Amino acid sequence: MAEKPFSDIFYEQYLHEEQLMSSRCKKCGALYLPPRPICAECHDANMEWEEIKGQGKLAAFTLINIGPAFMQKEGYTRDRPYCLGVVELEEGPRVDARIEGVDTTKPETIKVGMPLRVKYLHRDEGENKITYLAYEPM
Amino acid sequence: MQKRRKLGRGVALVGAGMSNFGMYKDKNSKDLFVEAFQDMTKSVDKGLNSNDIEALYLGNFSNDFFMKQSHWGPIITDLLGITPKPATRTEGACASSALAFREGVFAIASGFYDMVLVGGVEEMSKRSTADITEGLAMASVPYEGKAGFTFPGVFGVLATAYFAKYGATREHLMNVTIKSHNNAPLNPKAQFKVTIRDLMNAKIESLKKKGVPAPQWEDEKDFLHDPSANPSIAWPIHLYDCCPISDGAACILLVAEDIAKNFTDDPLYLIGMGQGSGKGLHAAETLTSFEATKYAAEEAYGMSGLGPEDIQFAEVHDCFSMAELIHIEDLGFFKAGEGYKAVGEGLTRLDGSKPINTSGGLKCKGHPVGATGIAQLYEVWTQLRNKAGKRQIPIKDLRIGAAHNLGGTGGTCTLTILERR
C-alpha cells in the first residue's frame, strides 16, 4: 500500500488518533515535524512516516491575554491568559504547542528548559473536529 | 556565500512622500495615497509631470480583508489620473511595499522603464481590534495560527527565548520603547507624538482630576512595570512594546540614474538591496534570529561593498520592541546577544553612534502594514537629505542609511541601502 501523503491533513488525522507522526528522509535521514513531503536538507522526496514519542523540553513560551476568537471561545480572557510554547523534542524537531498545567498568572514559575510530556486536546465533533497538540510538565 | 548582485543600470530616488499616520475615520486609502503622492510631488525639486510615470508598483497586505476591497493597483493609477499605465500590486505581509520598491528597481535597472512610482497603503482602523488581530495573524505560518498564536505571541516566544539565552529582561525591552517614544514627538507625521514620561504625567493628571489617588511612579520604567498602566498582551510583551493599528500611505519616485539630475541636484542612489524568505518558529534554526534578515543583509552588503559598520543609521522593523533587538543583531550592527546592552548604553538613540528608528519606528510612527516598507525609506530619504528638522541626526557627513522591513514570522525580510553622493 502506498504511503499516506506527507501532508498537513494526514498529520492532523494522526493527531486525532493521538499519534505524533513525523516524516523521515530515506536518503539523508533528516526528521521533520510536522511532516514535509520534500526534504529541506537534500531535497529528495522519498520520505517515510515515523512515530515519535513526543517528550521534550520548553524552548520558549508566551502567555496570550488577547487571543483569536477560537481561544476566547474556550474561556481565555485578558485575566485568564493561555500559554503557548515552542517545544524541543527529544528526537530533535521543535513544535508549536499549547502548554497546559502551568500557572499562567505567574510567568516567573514557567521555566525555559522545563521537561514536558505530550497530551492531546480534542475539541468539537464531526467535520469541525480538531486536535491540538499540547504539552504539560512531567 | 551568495553571488554578488548588481543592477543592469543605476537607479536613483528623486522624490518621496508620506501621509500622516494615524487612525482616521474621515480618510480612506485613496485619500491617504493622495496625501502621500502630493507630499512626494512637492519633494521633486525640479518638478514632476505625472504623465512621465511609466508604471506603478504598490504594496498592500490585506485591504481585501480590512476593507473588503482588493485589486488596489488600478484604483491608485486611476486616482492619480495615469491610467492606462500599468499597475502591479505586491504582497509580502508587513514587507509588502519593500517588495514594491524592489520591483520598481528591477523595472528600471533592466532598462524597461525610466521612471516608476513605488508606494504602499493600508487602511486598518475601521475594523475591530479582534478583526485586525485575526487579519494580521493570517500572515503567520499556518501551524502558528492554528495553535492560537497572535503576532504579539510570536514575539513573546522570541522574547522568552532571547531572555533565557542572553540574560536580558523586560527592562531591556523598555529601553527600546522609551528610546522610540523620545524620537516620535520630533516627527510631525508620527501617530504617537508623545514620550513615555509625557504619557505617565498625563495619566497622573487625569487620575488627579477624577479625584483618584495616582500611583507614585518614580520614573518611566516604574510606570511601564505597573500592569494598570502597561498591561500584558503576550508575556513578556506588554502594551507599550507593541506598535499601534494605523492607516497610512507612502510613495517614492524612482528614475534611471542617468536622468536623475533632470529632477533634482540632490538625488539619492540605491546601492544595496536584499531580500530573503524564512520558515516558521518551529522550523527556524534559532529563536533569537531571522534567517531571512541575515540573507537579505548579506545580499545588500555584498551588492554595496559595504558592511554593517558603514551604515550610519537605520530604520528597522520594530513591530514589537523585542523585534528591534533581534534585527540590530541580525543586521550586524551589534554582536548576537549584545543588542540589548547597546540599546541600554544609548548607542541607538538619535544622538548615539548608530541611531535606530529616528522616525519613532513602527512603534510610535505607526504601522499601516502595506505602507511601512516605503515609509521607512521615506525616513532614510528625509535624514540623508538633511530635512528631518528637530530629529535630524547630528552626524556631520550623513551619507549612508538603510531600511529593514520584515513580514510575518520573518517569512519575508528585506534590507535596502541608500547613498547620498
Image (cartoon, coloured by chain):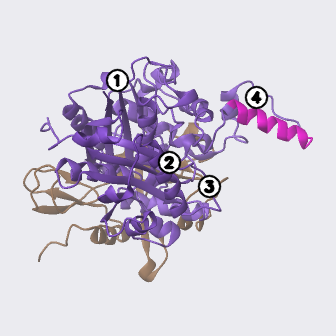
Chain colours: A brown, B purple
Q: Quadrant of the C terminus of chain B?
A: top left
Crowd around label 2: few <14 · some 14–19 · many ≥20 (10 Å): some
Disc with the residue nearer the chain's start (3 vs 2):
3
> Which residue is painted at 53% across and 57% down in the image?
B32
The Cα atoms of the two marked residues, 3 and 2, are separated by 19 Å
Which region is colored magenta? B197-211
Kindly identify which residue carries mark 4: B217
Disc with the residue nearer the chain's start (4 vs 3):
3
The Cα atoms of the two marked residues, 2 and 1, are separated by 38 Å
Residue B209 part of the magenta segment = yes
Residue B96 located left or right of residue A101: left
Out of A101 and A41, give the one closest to the viewer. Answer: A41
Kindly identify which residue carries mark 1: B335
Kindly identify which residue carries mark 2: B39
Kindly identify which residue carries mark 3: B23
The Cα atoms of the two marked residues, 4 and 3, are separated by 29 Å
Q: Quadrant of residue B44?
A: top left
Give residue B152's position: percent from left, percent from top. Answer: 51, 49
